[in-house]
Structure formats: structure tokens, C-alpha cells
């Protein structure tokens, strides 16, 4: 193998290693984004459950007021 081909092979190998490092960084970044999305999703589920609880309490209060009103 002549020097030019060997140097070209080394250059290609270095570029591949750089690309591999960039792909690893990108993968880690995507994992972080995914984790954030999962966290947001869990928060949304919690908010929805809280909203249902508030709605249930409001219905109970309305029913109680209606009952009191009916007795008057």
C-alpha cells in the first residue's frame, strides 16, 4: 500500500471516529429529550387526575347546595 492510500485510510478512519462520537452525543441528547417528554407526560397525567378530583368535589358541593336549597 502506498503512502497516499495509507494516509487516506487514516483520514477516513479519523472521520469515522469523529462521526461516531457525534452520533453518541446525539443519542445522549435524544435520550435526555425523551426523558423530559416522559416527565411532562407524567405531569400531564397528574394534572388531569387533579382536575377530575376538583370536578368531583365541585359536583359534590353543587349537589350539597341543591339538597340544602330543596330543604328550604
Image (cartoon, rainbow, N blue to C red):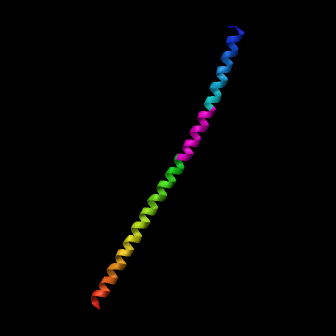
Name the residue at the left extreme: 70
**Range of magenta residues:** 21-33
Against 14, is 27 above or below? below
- Which residue lies at the image location 35% right of the left edge and 77% below the top edge? 60
Q: Is residue 55 above or below residue 34?
A: below
x, y percentage for residue 28?
A: 58, 41
Image quadrant assignment for residue 23: top right
Determine the residue located farthest toward the top in the rendered image. 2
Residue 60 lies in magenta, yes or no?
A: no
Per the picture, the main secondary structure of the magenta-coloured stretch is helix
Residue at 72 percent across and 10 percent down: it is: 3
Residue in the picture at 34% in, 83% down = 65
Residue 63 placed where, x, y %?
32, 79
The quadrant in which residue 72 appears is bottom left
> Is 69 left or right of 13, judged from the image as shown?
left
Where is residue 1? Give x, y as percent.
67, 8
Q: Position of residue 66 (x, y in %)?
A: 31, 83
Who's the residue at 64% across and 20% down the image?
A: 12
63 is higher (above) or lower (below) than 41: below
Question: Magenta segment: does it hold 29?
Answer: yes
Tell me how many marks there are: 0
Amino acid at each position: 500500500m502506498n503512502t497516499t492510500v495509507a494516509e487516506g485510510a487514516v483520514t477516513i478512519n479519523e472521520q469515522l471516529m469523529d462521526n461516531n462520537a457525534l452520533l453518541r452525543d446525539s443519542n445522549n441528547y435524544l435520550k435526555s429529550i425523551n426523558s423530559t417528554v416522559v416527565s411532562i407526560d407524567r405531569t400531564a397525567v397528574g394534572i388531569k387526575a387533579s382536575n377530575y378530583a376538583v370536578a368531583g368535589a365541585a359536583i359534590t358541593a353543587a349537589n350539597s347546595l341543591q339538597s340544602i336549597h330543596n330543604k328550604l
